Amino acid sequence: MSVVGFDLGNESCIVGVARQRGIDVVLNEESKRETPAIVCFGDKQRFIGTAGAANSTMNPKNSISQIKRLLGRKFADPELQRDLQSFPFRVSEGPDGFPLVHARYLGEEHAFTPTQLLAMVLSNLKAIAEDNLKSAVVDCCIGIPVYFTDLQRRSVLDAATIAGLRPLRLFHETTATALAYGIYKTDLPENDQLNVAFVDVGHASMQVSIVGYKKGQLKMLSHAYDRSLGGRDFDEALFKHFAAKFKEEYKIDVYQNARACIRLRVACEKLKKMLSANPEAPMNIECLMDEKDVRGFIKRDEFEQISAPVLERVKGPLEKALAEAGLTTESVHFVEVVGSGSRVPAIIRIITEFFGKEPRRTMNASECVARGCALQCAILSPTFKVREFQVNEGFPFSIALSWKPDSQNNEPQQTVVFPKGNPIPSVKALTFYRSNTFAVDVLNVETEDLQVTQKISTYMIGPFQSSKGEKAKLKVKVRLNIHGIVSLESATVTCNTMSYHLPLEKHITSL
Ligand SMILES: Nc1ncnc2c1ncn2[C@@H]1O[C@H](COP(=O)(O)OP(=O)(O)OP(=O)(O)O)[C@@H](O)[C@H]1O
Ligand SMILES: [Mg+2]
């Protein structure tokens, strides 16, 4: 049995494996710890990971990146539409309303679903783990953003199945970080609670969690996030700035040329990284377009000015996480930053001002999610003996059930079965008195915040027999499983002393 953790980033992926002496991050075929999350389709073959990234500037239209952004979302989703404006590859609406990604592969046009593309990335990560462990890898834990909806979670599980993996858990990225932080701590208080805020700024999103630690356990006190605030937004601000500048100075419009766009974006990302360590940085690109070499220059102050709209949004998730945890900044003992996007100095300044204390970088900012996932896999797997450490996870959304009462004229009834913060996993039982087959809907409560449809799935319960003129008593079990997916598990009819299970017919909503 394998014990592996995968951090599936929007930009890069990391593979952690459990060995008898601890968790290791393993190297890919290029001896790198980070593997780009890119699939590049060529005329003769397909390149994934490091090779995919190496080929992407030559072949931008067939290089598919940021697959996590496309997963489990409708084509019409406004956030997806915004993302598509900066992607060099073509995406269309499939017959089911979900996106299809187009690429030229082996001399032919192909259309892939985001799930298929994610499966390719996962297969590559699986192969990296297998090369290192010299054995088959099936059991694993996969990191997912805390804001992933039911459909996105199901898509990750589907992609994992296609790749031949069996996730023991889809594990929230911030919880993975919190576990990697806490499990080795020997000085956790026995009676008091140590409160730590984790801020993860990645490539495309920002997540904040506040965690309460006691000896041998952690409890997630709150989760907050901005799904569209990450390192790439700074690249985009720089990109727009330089695209306009070069148009004026060199009379070139990079928007008209996919290769020039991707080269300028790569240069902007490099520039942003330079500005994290230096007060100013140059930009030189040879032969960017129309055989023109371009030169530019920017100071950190100016960079912060042009990215002010992005920086203004950093405080939002911090405030929300603190409020939902019911804490004050004084009662948060430590602030830990992770995710490479947090290396922008202005972000650290905002976090410092907000909490009134310097954030710390106790952990390896890019590896902690993979390490936490590998640790969780080790805890769940019988293969390893891991130090006793309890992870009390809270579900980030509320889930309700809705049904129509037996009599025709009444309004549908609704009850929240798993309120926000509900422990994962969890089972609840509801009792119904019914004479006929009936439908129960599983619903998202915070539809606006998540930009999802309200209905997740519908279950038909029945048929069943009830004694004349009397309604049967039915017990329905609802499960919030370890991956954060809700389903109706069983329905049982009890009449006199007999009880029997009823058939459940399920329909997943894809509207
Ligand atoms: N020195 C640096 N200064 C500023 N930004 C940096 C630096 N190094 C890396 N980054 C940025 O960090 C981002 C990648 O961070 P990370 O690897 O944590 O993201 P990810 O896990 O792939 O994405 P996500 O968490 O959104 O799925 C990129 O936007 C990258 O440009
Ligand atoms: Mg990340």
Image: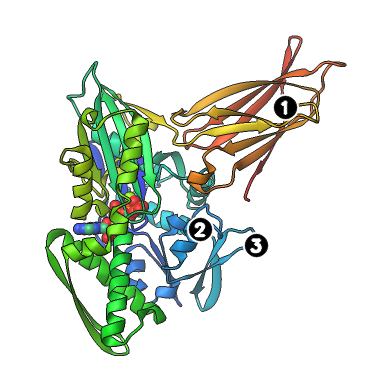
Helix, strand or loop at mark 3: loop
Query: Which numbered circle lies on residue 502?
Result: 1
Sequence-first disc among 1 and 2? 2
- Quarter of the picture holding the N terminus: top left
Mark 3 within 8 Å of ligand 1, using the beta carbon: no
- 88 relative to 478, above or below: below
- 445 relative to 511, above or below: above
**Nearer to the camera, 283 or 461:** 283
Q: Are the two marked residues, 3 and 1, in contact with CB atoms closer than 8 angstroms?
A: no
Q: What residue type is labelled 1?
A: Leu
- Residue at image coords 47%, 55%: 119
Sequence-first disc among 3 and 1? 3
The extreme bottom residue here reads 291
Q: Residues within 10 Å of mark 2 (few under 14, many from 20)?
A: few
Helix, strand or loop at mark 2: helix
Sequence-first disc among 3 and 2? 2
Helix, strand or loop at mark 1: loop
Q: What x and y, as percent, mark residue 2?
A: 38, 41
Spatial CA span between label 1 and label 2 = 40 Å
Query: Which numbered circle lies on residue 32?
Result: none
Q: What residue type is labelled 2?
A: Pro
Query: Residue 255 falls in which quadrant of the image?
Result: bottom left
Mark nearest the camera among 3 and 1 is 3
Ligand 1 lies in quarter:
bottom left
The residue tagged 2 is: 78
- Left or right of 301: which side holds 138? right
**Nearer to the camera, 112 or 192:** 192
- Residue at image coords 49%, 54%: 71
Spatial CA span between label 3 and label 1 = 34 Å
Spatial CA span between label 3 and label 2 = 18 Å
- Residue at image coords 21%, 24%: 188
The residue tagged 3 is: 95
